[in-house]
């Protein structure tokens, strides 16, 4: 069986290689046509086309999201999913390199498909829009898009090769204060200052930060601070994000943050309205059994991984997938260590030759990991055991 598996892997790699130019061109075309969340019409159409041409059954516009899709091949269990992202950042193009994520997912599926006749089971590419601004996977998770999967994987470009990932749970908050307008010099005593309410709350949150866990984050911007210096502002608004390593601590922080905003209302007399986004990102639960299998496959394509527990954590809607199925969110190096994602420099790296090598290596390694999962019942059992045992 082991020899058989190696032969299947070699065939998957050859298939990815056979599509090399087409895959690279597609990643560059998506890079040159950046579309922000839920507007990824071209990218999603191009990825669907590629998969359909390769014999996948494609459903477009799933879960009520026009740019979400599902492309499937094979039948029944085990079910292996490659998740695709393809949204750009507002104003910053592909500064998160999602052009590479979408194409590497599709490419991995093309490669792994060559093994399906021998392995049985099925492969699915799930196109998940709007990772950056909405969290498409959160919406899709609620609608069952990730139910029944044996594993789910997505490779994100970055500045190092790593298989274990962490990401913070994240909740997004919109607040508004309503006060009363007045002439700021002639009749200030009749005014209620909505900006003061927000500044009091902002400072209260600053004080709260001393007393939260190291890895937690609270940050925000004022989106309305009044219109004219000689008018007491009757309205103010802000957007905040609250992040924590686990969902329970996130809930605790959320109520502390609201207490700060209530303090602003109380101190100023302005009325507070707030709304938490219903698309809350869950913390990423990386499946280390699956990650270790993937590590061996990355090594097989010549990539040593460097996993150190980083204190630099963001959040991703892949966290919500990891709560429903054993999942990994490995990183592939396409940029030098000093270049961070969401920068102009990283956007350039996402179209470089390093990016093209990264895309192909990520695809080959994911295809091989899929073949491991499809052919190794013991691996599947250990992955599942870890998934069920983790909190
Ligand atoms: Zn990003
Ligand atoms: Zn990203």
Image (cartoon, helix red, strand yellow):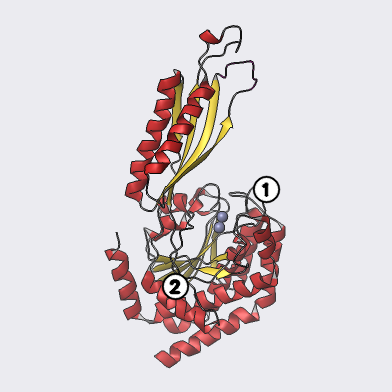
Residue 120 shows in the view: no
**Image quarter of the C terminus:** bottom left
Q: Tell me the magenta residue range.
A: 227-233
- Callout 1: few (<14), some (14-19), or many (20+) C-alpha neighbours within 10 Å? few
**Residue that mark 1 sits on:** 91
Examine the image and state in which quarter residue 93 appears.
bottom right
Q: Is residue 217 above or below residue 202?
A: below
- Residue drawn at x 34%, y 43% is 251
Which circle, 1 or 2, is nearer the viewer? 1
Q: Nearer the viewer, residue 313 or 157?
A: 313
Q: Quadrant of the N terminus?
A: bottom left
Q: Position of residue 328 (x, y in %)?
A: 44, 67
Q: Against 102, is 144 above or below? A: above
The answer to which image quadrant residue 50 occupies is bottom right
Residue 191 appears in the picture as rendered: yes
Q: Position of residue 95 (x, y in %)?
A: 64, 57
Residue position marked by numbered label 2 in the rendering: 122
- Residue 229 within the magenta-colored segment of the rendering: yes
Which of 11/131 is in front? 131
Q: Quadrant of ligand 1?
A: bottom right
Q: Is residue 3 magenta?
A: no
Q: Chief secondary structure of the magenta span?
A: loop
Residue 108 in the image, given as x and y percentages of width and height? 54, 73
Q: Residues within 10 Å of mark 2 (few under 14, many from 20)?
A: many
Answer above or below: position of 351 versus 221. Answer: below
Secondary structure under badge 1? loop
| Quadrant in the rendering for residue 2 | bottom left
The residues tagged by marks 1 and 2 sit, at their Cα atoms, a distance apart of 38 Å
Residue drawn at x 57%, y 11% as measured from the top left: 182
């Amino acid at each position: 069986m082991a020899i058989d598996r190696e032969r299947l892997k070699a065939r998957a790699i050859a298939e990815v290689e056979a599509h090399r130019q087409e895959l690279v061109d597609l990643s560059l075309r998506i890079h040159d046509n950046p579309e922000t969340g839920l507007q990824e019409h071209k990218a999603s159409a191009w990825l669907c086309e590629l998969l359909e041409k390769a014999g996948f059954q494609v459903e477009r516009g799933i879960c009520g999201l026009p740019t979400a899709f599902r492309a499937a091949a094979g039948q029944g269990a085990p079910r292996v999913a490659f998740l695709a992202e393809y949204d750009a950042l507002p104003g910053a193009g592909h500064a998160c390199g999602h052009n590479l994520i979408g194409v590497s997912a599709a490419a991995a599926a093309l490669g792994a498909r060559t093994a399906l006749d021998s392995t049985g089971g099925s492969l699915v590419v799930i196109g998940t829009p709007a990772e950056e601004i909405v969290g498409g996977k959160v919406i899709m998770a609620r609608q069952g898009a990730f139910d029944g999967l044996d594993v789910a994987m997505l490779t994100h470009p970055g500045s190092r090769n790593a298989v274990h990932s962490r990401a913070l749970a994240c909740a997004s908050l919109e607040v508004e204060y309503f006060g009363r307008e007045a002439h700021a010099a002639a009749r200030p005593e009749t005014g209620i200052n909505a900006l003061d309410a927000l500044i009091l709350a902002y400072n209260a949150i600053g004080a709260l930060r001393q007393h939260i866990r190291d890895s937690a984050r609270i940050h925000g911007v004022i989106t309305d601070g009044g219109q004219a210096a000689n008018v007491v502002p009757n309205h103010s608004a802000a957007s905040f994000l609250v992040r924590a390593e686990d969902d329970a601590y996130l809930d605790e922080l959320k109520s502390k943050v609201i207490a700060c905003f209530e303090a602003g209302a109380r101190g100023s007399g302005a009325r507070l309205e707030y709304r938490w986004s219903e698309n809350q990102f869950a913390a990423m639960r990386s499946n280390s059994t699956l990650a270790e299998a993937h590590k061996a496959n990355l090594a097989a394509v010549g990539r040593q991984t460097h996993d150190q527990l980083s204190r630099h954590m963001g959040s991703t809607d892949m966290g919500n997938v990891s709560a429903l199925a054993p999942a990994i969110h490995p990183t592939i190096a396409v940029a030098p260590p000093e270049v961070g994602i969401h920068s102009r420099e990283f956007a350039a790296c996402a179209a470089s030759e390093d990016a093209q090598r990264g895309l192909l290596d990520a695809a080959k390694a994911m295809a091989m990991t899929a073949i491991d999962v499809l052919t190794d019942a013991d691996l599947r059992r250990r992955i599942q055991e870890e998934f069920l045992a983790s909190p």
